[in-house]
Image (spheres, helix red, strand yellow):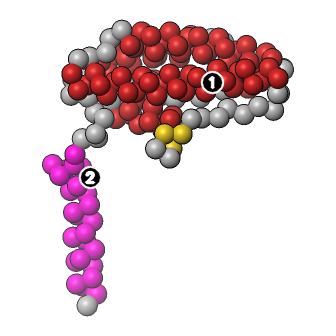
Amino acid sequence: MVIVTVALLLAMWGYVLYLAFGPGRQDPLDRLDDPAFATEAQAICEAAHDDVDQLPRAIEAESATERAAIVDEANERFAAMVDDLDAIIPTGEDGEIVTAWLADWRTYLGDREAYADALRSDPEAQLLITAKDREQVTEFIDSFARDNRMPACGNPIDI
C-alpha cells in the first residue's frame, strides 16, 4: 500500500512539473507575440526609474507638503514614460493588450496624483489604489510587466 501511495505521489508531481515546465505549459494570456515592444519599453521604463531615483525619497520628506511635491515630480516623470510608451504601441492584438495596460498605468497615476493632493490637506493621507476585477490595478500592471520580461515597467515603489 505504501509503495502504491508513493508511486501515485511521484506520478502526480511528475505531471505537475510537466505542466509547469514542459510542453504542456501555456504562455500567459497577456504575453505579447512580438517581443519588440517589451524590449523598447524596458529601456524607456528604466530611464524613468533612473530619473525618479535621483529625487529625494518621498518617505524621508520632512513634511507632508514636501512629500506631495516629491510625488508630483515622480508622477510627471512616470506620465512622460507612459506617453513615450504610448508612442510605440504595436499594431493588432498586441496593441490592444498594450493599450489596456497603459490605461491601467494612467489609472494608477491618477491614484498617485490624488494621493499627492490629499497630502496637502491631510498629513496622514494614504495612497489608495483603484480596484480592478477585485484586485488593485497595480497587480495588472505588474503581471503584464512580468509576463513580458519588462521588470522596470512594473509598479514603482517610490512612495
Foreground residue, 28 or 8?
28
The percent position of residue 20, horizontal first and vertical second, equals 26, 52
Amino acid type shown at disc 2? Ala
Q: Residue drawn 82% across and 27% down?
A: 122
Residue at 31% over, 15% down: 89
Element on which disc 1 rests: helix
How packed is label 2: few (under 14 Cα within 10 Å), some, or many (20 or more)? Answer: few
Q: In this view, does 73 lie above or below 139?
A: above
Residue 44 to residue 18: above or below = above
Which numbered tag is attached to residue 112?
1
The magenta segment is 2-26
Q: Is residue 11 magenta?
A: yes
| Nearer to us in this view, 145 or 76 | 76
**Image-quadrant location for residue 85:** top left
Drawn side of residue 67 relative to residue 81, left or right: right
- Residue position for label 2: 20
Residue at (34% x, 24% y) in the render: 98
Q: Could you say where residue 110 lies in the image, as x and y percent from the top left?
A: 58, 23
- Whether residue 126 sits left or right of residue 157 in the image: it is right
* SS label for mark 2: helix
- As drawn, is 77 to the left or to the right of 4? right
Magenta stretch, main secondary structure class: helix
Instruction: Look at 66% across and 14% down and name the residue there.
Output: 72
Where, quadrant-wise, is the N terminus in this rendering? bottom left
Question: Does the stretch in magenta take in 69?
Answer: no
